[in-house]
Structure formats: C-alpha cells, structure tokens
Image: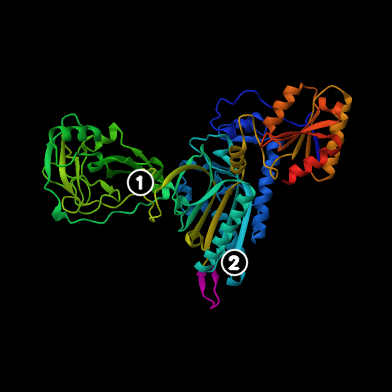
Amino acid sequence: MIEKLSHLFVRTLRDDPVDAEVPSHRWLVRAGYIRRVAPGIYSWLPLGLKVLHKVEAIVREEMLAMGGQEVHFPALLPREPYEATNRWTDYGANLFRLKDRRGNDMLLGPTHEEIFTLTVKDLYNSYKDLPLTLFQIQTKYRDEARPRAGVLRGREFVMKDSYSFDIDDAGLDASYQAHRDAYVRIFDRLGLDYVIVAAMAGAMGGSASEEFLAVAPNGEDTFVRSPGGYAANVEAVRIAAPDPLSPDDAPEMRVVDTPGASSISAVVDLLNSSHPGAEPWSAGQMLKNLAFLVTHPDGTTEPLIVGLPGDRDVDAKRLEAAFEPSTVAPFTAEDFEKHPALKVGFIGPVDASGQAVLGEDSISGIRYVLDPRIVEGTHWVTGANVVDQHVTGVTVGRDFTGDGVLDVADVRDGDPAPDGSGPLQLERGIELGHIFQLGRRYAEALGLKVLDSNGKLVTVTMGSYGVGVSRAVAAVAEATSDDKGLCWPLELAPYQVQILATGKDATVFEEADRLAGELSEHGLDVLVDDRKASPGVKFADGEILGMPIIVVVGRGLAEGTVEVRNRATGERSEVAVAEAVTAVLELARA
C-alpha cells in the first residue's frame, strides 16, 4: 500500500497541548494521531486508527488462537441486569447513567459481565456446552473523576473483554491459565517491557486477580517486585505481621503532658527532651490514629479510625482499593464536631483514665482498624483523647483491642517482601490487562445454571479478562517515543516506511514514487512525503510521525545514492539507488 502525505488527513503541531502531562499524550496529539473532543474523550484520526486496528488485530488473533469466539454487544444497556448484581449502585459516580424517552433507566457499559452471563443463560443449559470463552473488542464508558494523559485514562476507551464459562473450579483454573498465556503472547508481540503482578479484584469481585503492567516512569500504577520474584500491585501487597508478644511484659500506661505536640515528630522531640528513656524515642514507637469518613454507594456514611505505626502514612490508593466501591475521605472540621470524643492531633484508643475510646466496647462506637504491625502485646505512645496529653505504654490486648486489621500503610523501597524473597523495589507502570477469577457471583445473581453429568442443576463458574486496546497504543508510544517524536515498532506502525522527497527536481519525486512502488510490491506499507515543503519541515515531520524506516531521496540522487534511516536507533547510511530496496528490506527484517 502507498499513501501520499499530501492527500493524508493529518496536520502536525509544533507546540505541545496545554494539558499534556506524559510523552504519549504530547506526541499522539502533535503527530495528528488523536484529537481532543472533551476531557477524556478523543477522536482517532487516520494514522492513529491504523495503529489502533493493528493492536486490535494482535489481540483478536491471540484470542481466536486460544479458542475464544468473538461477539459484539451494545454499549447502551438497560438498568435491570446491573441492578440484579448491585453494580448499578456499586459503580457509583463512575457509571454513565441516562434515561430513554420513555423514562427507562439506561447506562453506557463500563464492562459487560451481566450481558455475557444472560446471553449464555438464554442459549446454553448443559455441561456439554462448556467450557466456553466469548470475547468482544468494543468501546467502553466510565465517568472518570480525573481523566488525564490522553487516551491512557479516558472516559471513552476501546477494550477487549472476554469471559469464560466452566462447569467447575478446575475448569475455571484452566480457562484462567489459557487467558494468562494468551496475554503473555499479546504483550510480547506488542514489544512492551511488562510485569505480571498480583492485584485486587475490586468491584469486579472474585478470587484470583492479576494485572499486566507496562513498566513506565509516567505510569499511574505503583507496583513492587523483589529479587526473588514476588510482584504485586501496591494495593495488593500484604505485609507479614510480626509474632504477637505477651502483654505481661509491657510497661504500665503513663500519661504524659505534651503541650502543643499534635504531630508525631513533635511528640518524639518532646519525649526525648523531657522524658528520655533507655533508648531514644522514635516515630516507629508512636501509634498514629487517622480519622476517615466512609461513604457507601447507597449514600450512607460511617466514621473510621485507622491505627498505624507513626513512621508510616496511609496510602490513599491502598485505602481506596480496600473499600471499593465505597469512597473514603479524611475527616473534615465538621466531622470532628460531630464526634467530640476525638481530639485532633491527640486521638488514641484509650483516654487518660484507661477507658476504651476506640475499638471493642468503646465509648465512641467508632470502628477502629489496625495496621498488621499493631499486634497483641506491642506497646505504643498514642494520644490520650485530651488536648496536650499522650499516653505511653498503651498495649494491644491489655488496654485496647481493634475491630479488625487493615493493611493500607504506605509500602516503601526496601520493605521485606511478604513471601521472604528479598527487599521490595517500587516501580511505576501502566495497566494493560487485568484477569479475574470471578467465580459464581454473576452466575448466582443472574441464575446461570446448567445440568451436570448427573442431571443436577449447578451454577456455572466464570472468569473475566480485559485488555486496554486504546491504552496499549499509548503505552507503546510512551515506551518508544523520544524527544523528537513517535517511534513505532514495525508491526504497529501505520506505515513501515516513509519516503521523504526533498528537493524541487521532478526526478526526486519520480524516484520516490518508483521506490515506493517496489517496496509496496514486497509487502511494505509506504508513506511518501510529496508535499511542496522545505527539507527541514519534512525531516521534522518524519521524526514526529514515527515510521520505523525513513528513506530520504534528495541531493544524493545526483550521485546515485539515497539515505536510509533507522528511526529507532538514529543510524543513517548512504546506499546506491539500485540497492535501496534491499537495504530497506534488510532493515525491516532485522
């Protein structure tokens, strides 16, 4: 295939978009691949659509190869199936809701578990029909609160979602592994540096869950990995709790005046100056108690206190993931007014008299959850629920008991891996795929049952598997672009070769057309820059557009040579015109 740039619907931009935060966003817009319509909503222009379709083709090929069957469901859906699974409420503000002219509640599909489940229910009723994997590649809609980074986090996006249906858990395990293997092949073909990490199931539900993350400094997701092979999304990290201690060995509680010391560092400094111990006091001996308000999807709220070591902070994303689909926000001044037992900067599980203020049998009745490190027998310095007072020696199991364990403290470089495989290293990534073992949640809610080999009705078990197709385009651009523009791998490039006809002599354009024709006959897609523009403009646009091989037909033609450039490496070579096609083909096969 040959395309002339003078006829192509594209316009490169010399300036970055004002809202561009990451390289992929900047270059996809500047190179004319996508165009912003509204926050988080983008049009795909000819060059971008060609790349998108190539990613779709790779995903489709691998899904078909693993035995999946392609379907296509509507994006506009009725409320009732999502009401049955409670996701009409659980999705909260992220769900696009609307009414039709008759007043019926509708939504724009964020994912299609319900519709796939009902379709299989309508058509299949025997174990002989299973296992089954169905998939679609379709536009999805989520009303992101903070759309950003171009098509990396949008409100409209293209996604491959597939669903497996099995008679039992062993079948689900096999379907899950088949999808996992297919995803490895997909992301290998996309040429991405990626990692597979343990993940949270979130609002999707289910048991086993893993994410495929492209390693990227600008990625929104934080993950950890260890030298021994442990890898997890930071939300899914579960620290190993220390062994409990005997409360009998703990010191007695003692009230300490701490005037003006409402922060951890201030308390530590005051204790070291006024109440020195055998060892210096440290933040790790403090019990920090933070107040939050949990808002559930139905609009109800409840207060929550999180207790954790004073040298740690709550990770907002880990906290959010732990309560999804509910939302969590720090207490406001108004919230504290409603709970006068809580004194800002001096919150603790007991008061100065030893009365339980938080946790089991407490006077506040506020739910109190503890970091896994706050185990029985450990003793802490914490607020006395009186302004300007703290208590030392407050001991778990003797003086207070929490209402549960919540692992939401920040994870840091060097923390030990939960499986003992070495120190953790924090890295950033872009989520490309997510696979879930859903189990029977959706099948139970929607009544998907089949007859087993004994003629007994059993509930089908399901898996759900997603690939962000449009996001993958941005992830590849993020990984391969440089300070001059895009730089596509050969399999994804809109055109494998771009020929720059630089000069005014008609023979330059004739030779460019001749080379394009020969390369096209060899199966390469070629873009010819035949515009009446300066060489400088053509060189700059060639780099921005990012075709992997650039051929310059210009001044060297008088001596019988053209220049062949490798866009990825920047290598350039002068080759004889008669050898140009061979040189390009060798580069394309490298």
- The answer to whether 579 appears left or right of 396 in the picture is right
Q: Which residue was labeled with disc 2?
A: 131
**Whole-percent x, y for residue 466 in the image:** 56, 51
Q: Quadrant of the N terminus?
A: top right
Residue drawn at point x = 22 percent, y = 43 percent: 285
- Give yes or no for residue 193 being in the magenta stretch: no
Farthest residue to the bottom: give it. 454
The front one of 147 and 121 is 147
Q: Which residue was labeled with disc 1?
A: 408
Q: CA distance from mark 2 to mark 1?
A: 38 Å
Q: Quadrant of residue 165?
A: bottom right
The front one of 47 and 530 is 530
Residue drawn at point x = 36 percent, y = 38 percent: 329
Looking at the rendered structure, the kind of residue marked 1 is Val
Span shown in magenta? 448-458
- Give yes or no for residue 451 being in the magenta stretch: yes
Element under label 2?
Answer: loop
For the question of whether residue 11 can be seen, the reply is no
Q: Quadrant of residue 261?
A: top left
Residue drawn at point x = 11 percent, y = 47 percent: 252
The front one of 296 and 80 is 296
Marks 2/1 in contact by CB < 8 Å: the verdict is no
**430 is higher (above) or lower (below) than 437:** above
**Whole-percent x, y for residue 526 in the image:** 79, 38
- The answer to whether 112 appears left or right of 558 in the picture is left
